[in-house]
Image (tube, rainbow, N blue to C red):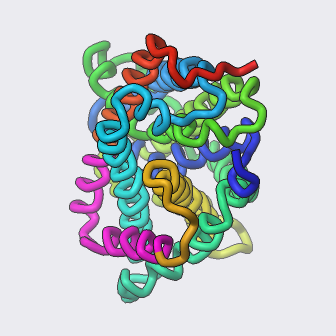
């Protein structure tokens, strides 16, 4: 645990929560409407319970080690060379996740605010705060997540304001879709919970590990409740048929409310949500850059960091097509599910290893 990277369990929970919801919530209501109609919220509820269980399992298995992250554990399990190879695959996933998030962010900016500005110009400007904070360390990144909570407060207040525009009959009859379609849709819902695995990377930096399980459960619980709120709001406002054809339902929802004095309320909500999206990308940037030092034992270097940022930006501007970008993001999400499963397998296998074990007191 180092000074610039140490954080509390509560701060880690904020990182997890923002990482999960910042980008994952934007398209999810429409995707679920296509798969299970008005029962999307049930899919989110069931998936949230599974995510809480998986997140809890990861923390419980990590408790056997007080000073090691998944990278250290993999080296103990597979040996130095094989451990570096498996860890590199995890690093590449984090790198592509950060780039994919930035890619989608740039496309949203083009659609909503800056249609004529080239991505190569926007990308460095958009992640400039992230460049600074990631360089300063995990502690700085974690502290800024508290500021991001205002975006969620604004979103919740907005949903309350448009309740009178909702038709809750759109949510009936409950469970009409059936068990098998709901079970199949949980895969799509789980994409929004990707990010719960980051605790396996940052675990050694948590100062109060005895509270890690509690706050990780809270993070996934709040993610589930917030996503359910947005899915219910979108479904009750647009109806399942119209919702299924919307490209960006969260931003469409922002156009529903008309204030008597303030014009273009949607711009305030969208701008606030861009902060949450930026923080979601920043979490993966931090995890990827932190991984470089953990895996390859490379000391903090401006040259290495500059190359890292260049790669993130370079990958994010590969395409400006929204369909290709979401296809890229879908691939990353599937890989993310694979990474979560792989982490659990590695942690379970580590239970049979005695070397390097330093249990929490």
The residue depicted at 54 percent of the width and 72 percent of the height is: 301
Secondary structure of the magenta portion, mostly?
helix
Task: Find residue 360 and report its horizontal and vertical position in percent.
Answer: 70, 21
245 over 301 or under it: above or below: above
Query: In terms of depth relative to the viewer, which is nearer, 305 or 227?
Result: 305
In this view, the residue in front, 12 or 220, is 12
- Looking at the rendering, which quadrant does residue 224 occupy? top right
Q: Is residue 285 depicted above or below 236 in this figure?
A: below
Quick one: quadrant of the N terminus?
top right
Residue placed at 62% from the left, 46% from the top? 15
Q: Residue at x 41, y 51 (%)?
A: 94
Q: Quadrant of residue 63?
A: top right
Is residue 116 shown in magenta?
A: no
In the image, residue 309 lies in the stretch drawn in magenta: yes
Residue at 34%, 69% in the rendered image: 316
Could you tell me if residue 45 is visible in this image?
Answer: no
Residue 241 in the image, given as x and y percentages of width and height: 31, 42
Q: Is residue 81 above or below residue 277?
A: above
x and y, in percent, of residue 64 in the image: 60, 19
In this image, 288 relative to 278: left or right? left
Residue bounds of the magenta highlight? 304-332
Is residue 305 found left or right of 244 in the rendered image?
right
Residue 110 seen anywhere in this rendered image of the structure: yes
x then y, percent, for residue 36: 31, 29
* Lateral position of residue 59 relative to residue 140, left or right: left
Return the residue nearer the eye: 182 or 47: 47
Q: How many marks?
A: 0
**In the rendered view of the protein, which quadrant contains the C terminus?**
top right
């Amino acid at each position: 645990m180092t000074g610039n990277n140490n954080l509390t369990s509560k701060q880690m929970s904020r990182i997890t929560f923002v990482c999960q919801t910042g980008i994952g919530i934007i398209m999810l209501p429409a995707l679920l409407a296509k798969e299970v109609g008005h029962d999307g919220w049930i899919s989110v509820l069931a998936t949230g319970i599974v995510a809480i269980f998986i997140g809890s399992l990861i923390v419980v298995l990590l408790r056997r080690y007080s000073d090691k992250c998944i990278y250290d554990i993999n080296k103990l399990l597979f040996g130095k060379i094989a451990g570096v190879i498996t860890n590199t695959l995890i690093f590449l996933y984090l790198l592509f996740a950060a780039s994919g998030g930035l890619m989608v962010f740039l496309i949203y900016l083009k659609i909503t605010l800056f249609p004529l500005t080239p991505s190569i110009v926007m990308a460095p400007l958009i992640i400039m705060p992230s460049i600074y904070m990631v360089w300063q360390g995990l502690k700085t990144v974690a502290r800024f997540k508290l500021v991001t909570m205002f975006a969620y407060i604004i979103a919740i207040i907005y949903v309350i304001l448009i309740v009178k525009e909702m038709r809750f009959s759109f949510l009936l009859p409950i469970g009409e879709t059936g068990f098998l379609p709901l079970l199949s849709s949980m895969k799509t819902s789980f994409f929004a919970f990707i990010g719960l695995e980051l605790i396996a990377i940052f675990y050694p930096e948590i100062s109060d590990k005895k509270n890690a399980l509690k706050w990780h459960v809270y993070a996934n619980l709040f993610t589930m409740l917030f996503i359910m709120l947005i899915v219910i709001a979108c479904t009750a406002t647009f109806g399942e048929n119209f919702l299924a054809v919307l490209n960006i339902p969260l931003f469409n929802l922002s156009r529903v409310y008309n204030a008597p004095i303030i014009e273009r309320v949607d711009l305030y909500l969208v701008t606030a949500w861009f902060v949450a999206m930026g923080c979601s990308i920043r979490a993966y940037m931090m995890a990827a850059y932190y991984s470089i030092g953990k895996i390859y034992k490379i000391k903090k270097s401006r040259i290495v960091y500059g190359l890292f940022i260049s790669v993130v930006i370079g990958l994010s501007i590969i395409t400006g097509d929204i369909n290709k970008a979401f296809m890229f993001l879908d691939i990353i999400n599937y890989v993310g599910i694979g990474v979560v499963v792989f982490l659990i397998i590695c942690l379970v296998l580590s239970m049979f290893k005695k070397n390097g074990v330093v249990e929490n007191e």
